Amino acid sequence: EGDSASETTSLKVMLDWYTNPSHAPLVIAQQRGIFERYGLDVELISPADPSVPPKLVAAGKVDLALSYQPQLHLQVDQGLPLVRVGTLIATPLNVTLVRADSDIESMKDLAGKSIGYSVGGVEKVLLNTMLEHNGVDPASVEMVNVNFALTPALISGKVDAITGAFRNFELAQMAQEGVKGRAFYIEEEGVPTYDELIFIANRDTLDTHRDAYARFMAAIEDATAWIINHPDEGWKAFTAYDPALDTPVNKKAWYNSIPRFALRPAALDVRRYKAFEAFLLERGQIKAKSPVSRLAVDVNRL
Amino acid sequence: MSMLKRFWPALLGIITLLGLWQILVVVSGVPDYILPAPLTVAQAFAAHQPLLWHHAGITVIEIVAGLLIGFISGLGTALALARFHGLRRTLLPILLISQAVPLFALAPILMLWLGYGMTAKIVMATLIIYFPVASTCYDGLRQTPQGWLDLAQTLGADRRRRLLRIQLPAALPALASGMRMAASAAPIGAVIGEWVGSSQGLGYLMLNANARMQVDLMFAALLILVTFGVALYFTTDALMRRLMPWHDDRISTR
Amino acid sequence: MSMLKRFWPALLGIITLLGLWQILVVVSGVPDYILPAPLTVAQAFAAHQPLLWHHAGITVIEIVAGLLIGFISGLGTALALARFHGLRRTLLPILLISQAVPLFALAPILMLWLGYGMTAKIVMATLIIYFPVASTCYDGLRQTPQGWLDLAQTLGADRRRRLLRIQLPAALPALASGMRMAASAAPIGAVIGEWVGSSQGLGYLMLNANARMQVDLMFAALLILVTFGVALYFTTDALMRRLMPWHDDRISTR
Amino acid sequence: MTSLGFSLSQARLAFSGQWLFDGLTVDFAPGSWTGLLGRSGSGKSSLLRMIAGLPIPDTHDVTLTTSDERPLSGRLAWMAQQDQLLPWRKVIDNVLLGPALRDRPSAAQYQRALDLLGDVGLSDKTQQWPKTLSGGERQRVALARTLFEDAPVILMDEPFSAVDAITRLELHELAARLLAGRTVLLVTHDPLEALRLSDRILILSGQPASLSDVDVPDGHPPRALDAPDVQRMQSHLVRRLHTPHGPIDGSGA
Amino acid sequence: MTSLGFSLSQARLAFSGQWLFDGLTVDFAPGSWTGLLGRSGSGKSSLLRMIAGLPIPDTHDVTLTTSDERPLSGRLAWMAQQDQLLPWRKVIDNVLLGPALRDRPSAAQYQRALDLLGDVGLSDKTQQWPKTLSGGERQRVALARTLFEDAPVILMDEPFSAVDAITRLELHELAARLLAGRTVLLVTHDPLEALRLSDRILILSGQPASLSDVDVPDGHPPRALDAPDVQRMQSHLVRRLHTPHGPIDGSGA
Ligand SMILES: Nc1ncnc2c1ncn2[C@@H]1O[C@H](COP(=O)(O)OP(=O)(O)OP(=O)(O)O)[C@@H](O)[C@H]1O
Ligand SMILES: Nc1ncnc2c1ncn2[C@@H]1O[C@H](COP(=O)(O)OP(=O)(O)OP(=O)(O)O)[C@@H](O)[C@H]1O
Ligand SMILES: [Mg+2]
Ligand SMILES: [Mg+2]
């Protein structure tokens, strides 16, 4: 299908953060020429601050960006002309982590503890929900912004737990330092499930690019399938993209990430967006409800 | 009255800046979530008063503490460098290196050692101020006119008194220049500290607002921060002038 | 030879620092992922040579360009402030404000306007250097001894020549002080620029390595960066001395 | 160049409310040399600053008129009591400061500066930095700079105070030669110097101070030091400096 | 206080390879006043610096011995050619600089400084900043600071050059009174001043320079100016300054 495209379309795609195994399908599609096959010339850009990509998409400086579903709700609520056009990782990655050798067996034991997080905008709400779900008074825990240093803060004992860690990555990082971790999964602790990594595009110019985005999602889909089929070869291709990626932690994270990739990146689960929006509205995180069509679209729908 | 006079040019500048900012926003059509217009920011400011002042209070403490410690340790280092020559050969490069290290790189270490409380942020603000103060003071201390040093020698001054009663006052103009500059940088130090690890203060508020795309709130916090910076500059300036009644820098050469 | 002599104290300081660092790591038992030992860093340095030099090359260009532009525009601003009095009342506070704004806050705007190429990073480095240079130069320009200004007046100098031939040379020692300081801060400017948006350069490498907990690699990059900072300081120092053959700052007062 | 005279009227100056002088009126004839004497602190340097139009921090006021009714500014050279050499300019470039501040020194000007430095006895120091000069050498550079200006009105504030007696006599002759026809106001503490060089001698004295004339010897400056006139008048002048208000010669201008 | 004599031997000094003087040897008798004259640039100030032990940038060497064989340092007061007032200290505090640099001025010292300022005619300026002083006033503050030190050896570099003739005579008397019994080395350009105040007069001259003695009038300093001796010797001295190497009085020390 894509092979027949005589003209190639250039796309600037901004990741949410430095290249890491969560971005595997993008990197693989690039490395294996899958984008080319779909008539796309894709430039991948990493930011250092995850809040920047949505702004640049909204301002029309890049075409697509990776962001997070909870943030999308806030962004749209703030009036940014953004819309989800695809899903990279279809489950939450967010976990609350404690050291396995600590006395914290469940979220209930977090009462009175200190919890580190990295500011993303919604950590407090998510954590409070989890705590309340477990009957813990959120006021009894001390929340500490440790920014980029989640793992060090936990393993060095500066905080008792961290939240907002990624299950595919931080656990591997802890293991690397010889510390076993215990994870509490957010969707098991009272928070509605959501898509962790999504592709967002500018709503105002969506129609002119719909075709390119559809091809882009198809390429991601192909790349994902190939990774699942060839995980080891995939790892090699991934590290060939940037030799600096070749670290033991990344390798672990690579295999941890594979089961998390959306098999149908373009597919839209309307219920998830409705439910999560309702959750945020109830928690006072957004001012108003938007129709799902303002939040997310299926680029393949006629 | 004289306060008003002193701050009037600054006010004028700020008003000009606000005007330019508003025009820029209108003309260039930058979207609100990148650069909100001053009026939007003013609204956010009004709407979030208690929140802003709460966080501002914390940051102010960090800034002022950092400033004082930075001033004192910077001046102390400069004096030590001028006093002990062996020290200079090794301490100066260390100082230089400390300046050349981006604070962000050290932040995790500092946080680990000092925890996520106020101390770490004060240390960050201190570090930002420390080098410019130490460096300009030291430069000033080195440039005492030879005649005064000769005089001190024949009058039988020991090194310590020569340093404190001759070189230090002679360096005051240079020192004032360094202090003024450092004062306006202090808020940045505190904010970086808060970015790296904190759940309070204007830096945290900015980070959080930014993550939540509340850019107007972020700019309102920024506005307070900048006001601190400017106020600190002028306060330091006034204090340094007080310290030098004999000195007339020609603000108003024709 | 004389180069060796000039840099010898710096080398000594660096060696001392490395020694202290190694001792600190051993004694305090800081884990590797917070503060790796110098030897570990040296290994990482050796292992990642091509990677490091590739990114370093990019950062060097940013630093040097930022430094030059920052020097020139800072000096230009100071001269303009000293020359045009109307300007001072409004420009000075604007300058101050520009200094008090944490660059991070402006980063998205800069990126929006300048893209994420090298320009934005050069602008960041420039901004970091700009204020200290402008501020110290301006302070220096204001403090010309009255006698020389009087002389210029009776000799019929116009304002421009008085500025360039009297006030500017008289301010050179102050200016040198500001330049030295700014030079050692330039690498930080470039790195902040890279943090904000880049896929190349030492700053990018550091943040990236940090995010992956490759702390040894991060410190190896940091080491290069610090070396730049120190080298720039001494280069600037040497250049400024060249500019002032008549001036003896008493490096070696007894 | 035709000579340019000028006159002051109602010159007044106060520091922190205390009048140094008030209502001074005096006329400087075109091409004449006036020696100005007075006790230390009487206001001589300040008066020169006022004539030169230089800033003074406190209350002051003067009406200046010139013989051709055009402003004086730009047509006078001022040699301050301190040498005011610029440390970043070599000796020759300090002499060439005037042209450098107005435009750019020409080759002819460079040669003239060299000649002047030779005249003041510094031909072997033209390329040195000011900091390597002795006190008297610095003063001679400042003198050369003033002479270089070739202005119709010259204000000199103790221009020979730091040089030895012999050099001083030589410089007197040099100045008299080069500044012939200029209107010169010379502040000095050396009565002999005043008697040697002046067409007219004024003493600034009193509280507030006024100016009074003193007799000068006959003949044209520079007068010989051993002229009996000069010797006699020196003691007279010194006595006048002691008792300034006695109406020995009639009162001031 | 017993008087302290000192002597120099083999004093030599060169700037950029050129010998200013080489092998100077001279003895300063305890309690004597020595006037040092010489052409501008002959090296008088440099010689004073060497005696005071102050840094000199180029080749130099001297052997100093004192009459009590203990080092001179800490027992001399040096008054430089420039006044070197500290702008951040008021007039009185400039006079008190010595005690402030060694310890902390006592009430008695404060009173003494006030008295000295009165002696030099500045009792109404004690609380002013140096920048508000006239040239002569600055020099008098520097003189008061030097006199305050009450040192057994005094080096003064043209200490009266910026004051008027009358003040100068008064200061001569003041210095002679306060420094009686001190060993004083006085650089001056005024032959009369040297004749008035010196027990011995030295001329530094030649290339490289040597020191030679000149006759001084009879009687004890300060001598009256109108003493016939003084007048006669003045012209003799001036002639000697002109032709330094003529063996008029026998050669130097
Ligand atoms: N800025 C000032 N503030 C207060 N008083 C001042 C200021 N400037 C000068 N004076 C005073 O004015 C008087 C006259 O000063 P001026 O320099 O004119 O004296 P002068 O006649 O040149 O003395 P000298 O012969 O010592 O140079 C002095 O007593 C001085 O203290
Ligand atoms: N740092 C230096 N480098 C080169 N030459 C110097 C230096 N310092 C002094 N000289 C020279 O040494 C000579 C003697 O200087 P000094 O100040 O001792 O003279 P002086 O006898 O005190 O003269 P004056 O009567 O003019 O004060 C001068 O010719 C001067 O140019
Ligand atoms: Mg005067
Ligand atoms: Mg001298």
Image (cartoon, coloured by chain):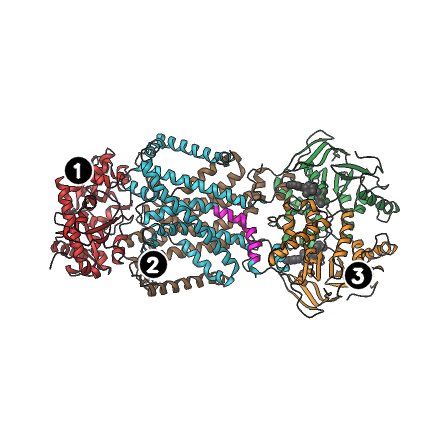
Chain colours: A red, B brown, C cyan, D orange, E green
Label 1: chain letter: A
Q: Amino acid at mark 1?
A: Glu
Image-quarter location of ligand 2 = top right
* Residue at the bottom extreme, as displayed: D69
Residue A65: image location, x then y, percent: 23, 52
- Between E185 and B22, the one lying in front of the other is B22
Residue C41: image location, x then y, percent: 34, 34
> Which element is circle 1 on?
helix
C-alpha gap between disc 3 and disc 2: 75 Å
Say whether residue D42 is visible.
yes
Prevailing SS of the magenta stretch: helix
**Residue D199 - label:** 3
Q: Which residue is mark 2?
A: B220
Closer to the camera: disc 1 or disc 2? Answer: 1
Residue B134: image location, x then y, percent: 48, 43
| Few, some or many residues within 10 Å of mark 3 (<14, 14–19, 20+) | many
Do discs 1 and 2 share a chain? Answer: no
> Which element is circle 2 on?
helix
Say whether residue A193 is visible.
no
Residue C143: image location, x then y, percent: 56, 53
- Between E115 and C36, the one lying in front of the other is C36
- Between B207 and E241, the one lying in front of the other is E241
Q: Is residue C167 magenta?
A: yes
Magenta residues? C161-179
The quadrant holding residue E184 is top right
C-alpha gap between disc 1 and disc 3: 107 Å
Q: Which residue is mark 1?
A: A233
**Is C23 left or right of E236, judged from the image as shown?**
left
> Which element is circle 3 on?
loop
